[in-house]
Image (spheres, rainbow, N blue to C red):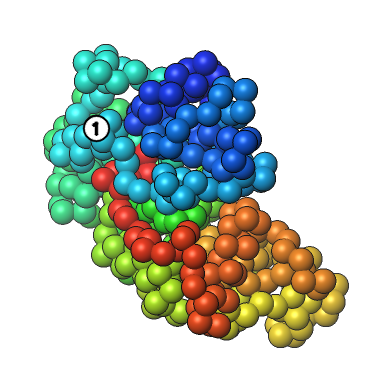
Amino acid sequence: MIRATLPPTDEMWDAFMERDPEYDGIFVTGVATTGIFCRPTCPAKKPARDNVEFFAGAREALTAGYRPCKRCRPMENGAAPDWIAGLLEDVEADPGRRWKDQDLRDRGLEPERVRRWFQRHHGMTFHAYHRARRLGEAIGRLKDGARPASAAFDSGYESLSGFHEAFRRETGSTPGRGVVETPILLHRLTTPLGPMIAGADERALYLLEFADRRMLETQIERVRAQTGRVAVPGVNEIILRIGEELDAYFAGKLRTFTVPLETPGGAFQRAVWEELRRIPYGETRSYGEQARRLGQPPVMVRAVGRANGDNRIAIVIPCHRVIGADGKLTGYGGGLWRKRRLLDLERAVVHGSALGPLFADTRVELEPGSID
């Protein structure tokens, strides 16, 4: 995933001073005198400019040594802000509409700001989102028995050739009546540790990754290649279910996930992932111990580590429970700070400790849109 570039410093400072909600999710502010970082909309008293630095997100601020503000709770990623939520709702109401930059300006939205927000939170531009959403609408019509021409024009395509090209680009084949496989639906979930992207069909969960993971796009491509299915924005019962289970997990009320999983991959990878699922909640294992339990010699430790890194279903397949032989945290695609938080959560539940402000009264919410 390509990380969005921060706005100019003067622009961020003005947004911070004015508590501009349009910048919530674009940057966070670290305050050197207090050691905390805040949302742009934080109601706390504003510091002097010399004591402020800006970060693209919570991970960067935490890495720099700041702790989250208890007033604005920048670690708790809620639903999309009002200024973008309305746009997402309109796209869902009319997936076939063709959006242009001028349409955004007519709504009082700067196209560059919209692009930054979508890339920051979803790894795609807004225009890529609504193109994918339109294709998903057409595929749904094909599955219901529509002819390709009807599916194309009813979904907002201006020409049949344009629809064929978009379909071929996503699936590697041409749209034929009755031959369309059920797509993998991609949807953005928000959690106390940041947004995640869930991918599922009507039967099982294929993908659950933190949205800022660098390999997110690669993992989506692997799912598409291994299943031969198109991946488009949308939501289904499996995604709703994993959202509910994540809610319970972060609240300390769920230790074992029950959502069905589909994990296409090599035989060795699948064995590694199954062994990960056998690690008890609240416990850890070393890579060496994991290899031994798989019946593998010590020389296979690195291969086990690579397979852990290829895991596409974070938290549910708990690769965060594997640590170094010396007890140190190593190798987690979502970032070591998240690995620490997940382990702290599980240990607190096992030992009956307070979960702390990060996980108290948290709720996983479904965004009004999907991966964009």
> Which residue is depicted at the point 41% across and 20% down?
112
Dot 1: few (<14), some (14–19), or many (≥20) neighbours within 10 Å? some
Q: Residue at x 15, y 52 (%)?
A: 145
Q: Quadrant of residue 19?
A: top left
Q: Residue at x 43, y 24 (%)?
A: 17
Q: Secondary structure at mark 1?
A: helix
Count of numbered marks: 1
Image location of residue 344, percent across then percent down: 58, 69
Residue 302: quarter of image: bottom right
Q: Is residue 33 visible?
A: yes
- Give the quarter of the figure containing the C terminus: top left
Residue 163 in view here: no
Q: Inspect the image, locate mark 1, and give the three-letter code of the amino acid beneath it.
A: Leu
Q: Which residue is mark 1?
A: 87
- Quarter of the rendering containing residue 248: bottom left
> Where is residue 173 shown, x and y percent of the image?
39, 44
19 or 268: nearer the viewer: 19
Indicate whether 250 appears above or below 77: below
Report the side of 84 relative to 152 (left or right): right
Q: Judge from the rendering whether residue 78 lies leftward or rightward of residue 46; answer left or right.
A: left
Residue 32 to residue 332: above or below:
above
Q: Position of residue 320 (x, y in %)?
A: 61, 67
Name the residue rendered at 26%, 59% in the picture: 236
Which corner quadrant holds the N terminus?
Answer: top right
Image height of 24 relative to 214, above or below: above
Identify which residue, 72 or 151, lies in the foreground: 72
Residue 5 x/y as whole percent: 55, 26
Instruction: State the residue in front, 65 or 184.
Output: 65
Residue furthest out toward the right: 299
